[in-house]
């Protein structure tokens, strides 16, 4: 059944709202770390894991979760991701100690990895070529606006309501967004001819990204020339090399289709190609 203009407008609003929510949440939490550490009677190094754990979970699962969109459908994966984000926001807002909060933030990272790729997938599915640029532009507005208002609105919430409401404010936003997406996104068209998922490849990729991001987050403590940092970067490189070797085996749907890197228009930005063709460089 073809969508009406009202349904498409509602869907685009909900997609932009979900992008705004997750970017507001990330920037607002950054602002409140000192207050949270004081209230939960912990040190700043420990509470910093609310950020590190969030990013590590997101980095490890974004590509595997995005791969599952083709198998289970954009709408279903989006609603699952938003539901997990809603649950993790409640747990974070009710946390009574640092490790409960860190665990909730890791779950938020997992949920973000699940639902954020679906926002782009929903746009490409429901908007034709003539409306695609406009739809992507509004999604970008949601991302940028969420990051812009995060520190200001987060500071106001922190001052007048307390740090817990930085997480609890996600509840009505997530409920509204998921309701609109459920009503306006239409039915999923799941693919049944996909190859078996490469679970081992997903694990290797996740480990390589976790090691890489963890080492980069520690570079100021360890130092760029330290043995720990060099060993961690080398481990991430070896894991990624192992992924390439593993994916060279036939019969699996690759986590990362390396053939993309042979596509010059995809790898080299068009403006660089244009500049070279005009002999400007």
Image (tube, rainbow, N blue to C red):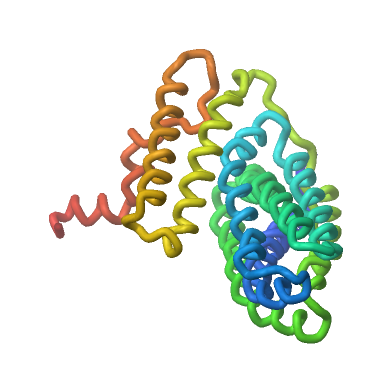
Q: How many marks are shown on the rendered structure?
A: 0
From this viewpoint, is residue 88 visible?
yes
In front here: 111 or 206? 206
Quadrant (top left/top right/bottom left/bottom right) for the C terminus? bottom left
Which residue does the image show at 66% across and 76% down from the upper left? 34
In front here: 272 or 88? 88
In front here: 158 or 76? 158
Left-right relation of 249 to 10: left
Asked if residue 249 is positioned above or below residue 186 in the image, the reply reads above
In front here: 208 or 183? 208
Among the 4 quarters of the image, the one containing residue 195 = top right
Among the 4 quarters of the image, the one containing residue 193 = top right
Asked if residue 214 is positioned above or below residue 194 in the image, the reply reads below
Which residue does the image show at 60% across and 45% down from the upper left? 124
Residue 105 image offset from top left, x and y in percent: 71, 56
Quadrant (top left/top right/bottom left/bottom right) for the N terminus? top right
Residue 94 image offset from top left, x and y in percent: 86, 63
Residue 60 image offset from top left, x and y in percent: 58, 42
Left-right relation of 7 to 253: right
Among the 4 quarters of the image, the one containing residue 15 = bottom right
């Amino acid at each position: 059944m073809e969508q009406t203009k009202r349904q498409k407008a509602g869907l685009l609003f909900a997609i932009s709202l979900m992008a705004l929510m997750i970017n507001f949440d990330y920037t607002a939490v950054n602002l409140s770390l000192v207050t949270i550490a004081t209230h939960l009677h912990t040190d700043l190094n420990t509470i910093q894991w609310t950020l590190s754990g969030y990013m590590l979970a997101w980095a490890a699962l974004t590509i595997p979760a995005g791969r599952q969109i083709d198998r289970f459908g954009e709408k279903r994966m989006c609603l699952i991701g938003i539901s997990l984000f809603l649950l993790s926001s409640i747990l974070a807002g009710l946390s009574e100690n640092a490790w409960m909060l860190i665990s909730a933030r890791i779950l938020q990272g997992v949920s973000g990895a699940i639902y954020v790729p679906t926002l782009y997938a929903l746009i490409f599915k429901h908007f034709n070529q003539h409306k695609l640029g406009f739809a992507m532009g509004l999604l970008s507005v949601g991302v940028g606006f969420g990051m812009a208002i995060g520190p200001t609105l987060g500071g106001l919430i922190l001052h007048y309501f307390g740090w817990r409401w930085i997480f609890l404010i996600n509840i009505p936003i997530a409920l509204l967004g998921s309701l609109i997406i459920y009503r306006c996104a239409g039915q999923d068209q799941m693919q049944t001819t996909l190859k078996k998922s490469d679970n081992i490849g997903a694990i290797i990729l996740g480990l390589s990204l976790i090691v890489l991001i963890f080492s980069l987050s520690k570079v100021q403590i360890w130092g760029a020339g330290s043995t720990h940092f060099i060993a961690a970067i080398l481990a991430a490189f070896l894991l990624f090399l192992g992924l390439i070797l593993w994916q060279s085996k036939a019969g699996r749907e690759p986590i990362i289709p390396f053939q993309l890197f042979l596509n010059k228009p995809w790898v080299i930005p068009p403006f660089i190609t244009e500049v070279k063709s005009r002999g400007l460089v």
